[in-house]
Image (cartoon, helix red, strand yellow):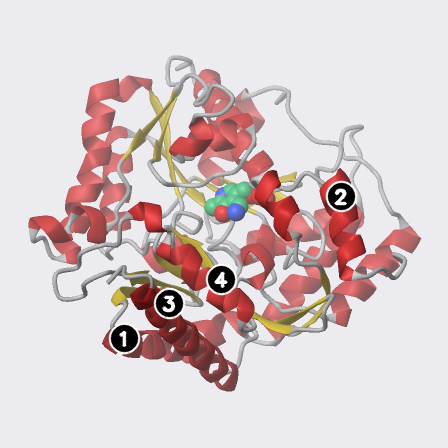
């Protein structure tokens, strides 16, 4: 247990020693980090005693909510029994085997094998090496190129950040690595609406960008396409329903592997176990992390379809790749308890049939707010776009960071909602009730109203 300290003391120690991910440290040091001390259900509490509704599930991961003792007990029991053993020495542990078996049951039928990692980034690094090894094993080593999307997010490792299309990330550290290229994202508001395309028409146009890129690179050089069913970190960009089936058709046409990054969309988030099921694709590989353990301990992995596994197993020889913690028994035990809880509580069905549609209805009602230009939801993820003029759709100048102004009001009023540019996004725990959706919507309206007054007072309208 940590010693008890004041908030100020925690903040001083934090800025003296802790380098945070994705953080500009000078302003953070001036302000001091918010210290989160405990959590229960969908709420967290900071060191000043404030109760906050966590509409981001931590970082898109606490699907079963906080305070689930079944997960705690599973971890403790496994730590006592066998805290660690590896899977390198032609050895395996019962929880890792059982989890592999359980994942084969809950994922789409083409998946019977899993490669375990500790995070989503490592999962996507594994994908890069695995798809290239797959093609080399089939005698086509020239198939190296993997196509991702601008504003996609696939992690922070060298390969993960390269697959992703975040220009600010590419600008640091010499990315992307060779053999990775990108197409535009299926973001209707930015690409379709100004051209007068309906969402469905735009979905086909956006998928067509993949075909154009394949032809540009040369179909015999392309190994795979990777995408998130719904782009999460990019701003909860829900693609038109025509998009993924068309992507699937194009991948089939050119014999290219389709990789679904399910790190956010997996384990019920979209109202099916996996986002590809909601969006209508049939991936060859699927990356997962986050919701597999609801973030209680780190775990990730790659689901490998029969088509790929057959080649790897029968022709691939040794795959020179793996992590100390691949198949960590404690993480596997927690994942098993977590999946058990999702099943027992029928969380996927609740998202699909009850609380997801209810959230969608509530989000639609936000369209009457003067600041809201558009809303999108998919299962229990949602986005609202803040605009300067909702009749013309005119955006605020990006340098005003209106999203951050809104996020500040959320922070000050007991709500964690994230800003991606001027898109305000949520992905709350799947255990959320309708009454809690009402509570969330009241907070959102209040914060939007405060933002409106603030923006008007600054003369930005
Ligand atoms: N893929 C997606 C779609 C993600 O959202 C993330 C993390 N937000 C990752 C990969 C990377 O996962 P991790 O942070 O566990 O490495």
Residue under pointer 2: 328
Query: Would residue 254 be seen by someone viewing this image from the given angle?
Result: yes
Residue receiving disc 4: 408
Give the residue pinned by disc 1: 369
- Point out the residue furthest to the bottom here: 435
Which residue is more in the foreground, 176 or 69? 176
Mark nearer the viewer, 4 or 1 = 4
Q: Are marks 3 and 4 in contact (CB under 8 Å)?
A: no
Disc nearest the viewer among 3 and 1: 3
Q: Residues within 10 Å of mark 4 (few under 14, many from 20)?
A: some
| Relative to 390, residue 188 above or below | above
Q: Can residue 356 be seen?
A: no
Which residue shows up at 76% across the image and 60% down it? 7
Q: Earlier in the sequence, mark 3 or mark 1?
A: 1
Q: Nearer the viewer, residue 316 or 177?
A: 177
Q: Work out how far the residue at label 1 is from the one at label 2, CA to CA, in angstroms.
A: 48 Å
Q: Residue at x 33, y 64 (%)?
A: 455
Horizontally, residue 3 falls left or right of residue 88, namely right
Report whether the residue tagged 2 is closer than 8 Å to ligand 1.
Answer: no
Sequence-wise, which precedes: disc 3 or disc 4?
A: 4
The residue under the point 18% across, 65% down is 390
- Does the numbered disc 1 mark a residue whose Cβ is under 8 Å from ligand 1? no
Specify the quadrant that holds the C terminus. bottom left
The residue labelled by disc 3 is 454
Residue 13 picture location, percent across and down: 79, 46
Secondary element at image label 2:
loop
Eye-nearest disc, 2 or 3:
3
Question: Whole-Å distance between the Cαs marked 2 and 3?
Answer: 49 Å
């Amino acid at each position: 247990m940590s010693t008890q300290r004041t908030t100020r003391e925690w903040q001083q120690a934090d800025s003296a020693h802790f380098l945070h991910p994705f953080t500009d440290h000078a302003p953070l040091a001036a302000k001091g980090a918010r210290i989160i001390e405990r959590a229960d259900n969908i709420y967290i509490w900071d060191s000043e005693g404030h109760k906050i509704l966590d509409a981001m599930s931590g970082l898109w991961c606490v699907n079963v909510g906080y305070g689930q003792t079944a997960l705690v007990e599973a971890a403790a029991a496994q730590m006592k029994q066998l805290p660690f053993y590896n899977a390198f020495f032609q050895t395996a542990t019962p929880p890792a085997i059982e989890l592999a078996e359980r994942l084969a049951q809950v994922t789409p039928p083409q998946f019977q094998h899993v490669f375990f990692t500790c995070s989503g980034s490592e999962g996507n690094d594994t994908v890069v090496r695995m798809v290239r090894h797959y093609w080399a094993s089939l005698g086509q080593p020239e198939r190296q190129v993997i196509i991702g999307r601008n504003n996609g997010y696939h992690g922070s490792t060298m390969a993960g950040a390269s697959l992703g299309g975040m220009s600010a990330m590419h600008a640091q550290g010499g990315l992307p690595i060779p053999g990775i290229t990108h197409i535009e994202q299926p973001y209707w508001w930015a690409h379709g609406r100004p051209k007068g395309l309906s969402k469905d028409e735009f979905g086909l146009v956006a998928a067509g960008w993949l075909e154009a890129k394949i032809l540009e690179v040369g179909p015999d050089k392309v190994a795979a396409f990777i995408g998130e069913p719904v782009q999460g970190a990019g701003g909860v960009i829900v693609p038109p329903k025509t998009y993924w089936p068309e992507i699937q058709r194009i991948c089939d046409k050119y014999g290219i592997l389709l990789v679904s990054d399910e790190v956010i969309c997996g384990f019920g988030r979209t109202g099916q176990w996996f986002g590809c099921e909601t969006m209508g694709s049939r991936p060859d590989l699927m990356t997962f992390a986050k919701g597999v353990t609801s973030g209680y301990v780190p775990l990730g992995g790659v689901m490998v379809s029969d088509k790929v596994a057959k080649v790897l197993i029968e022709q691939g020889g040794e795959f020179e790749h793996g992590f100390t913690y691949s198949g960590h028994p404690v993480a596997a035990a927690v994942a098993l308890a977590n999946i058990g809880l999702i099943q027992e509580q029928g969380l996927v069905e609740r998202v699909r049939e009850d609380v997801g549609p209810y959230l969608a209805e509530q989000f639609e009602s936000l369209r009457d707010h003067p600041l809201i230009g558009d809303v999108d939801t998919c299962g229990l993820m949602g986005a609202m776009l803040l605009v300067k003029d909702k009749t013309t759709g005119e955006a605020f100048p990006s340098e005003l960071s209106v999203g951050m102004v809104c996020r500040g009001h959320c922070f000050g009023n007991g709500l964690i909602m994230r800003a991606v540019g001027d898109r305000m996004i949520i992905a709350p725990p799947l255990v959320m009730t309708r009454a809690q959706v009402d509570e969330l919507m009241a907070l959102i309206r209040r914060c939007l109203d405060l933002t409106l007054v603030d923006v008007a007072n600054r003369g930005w309208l």
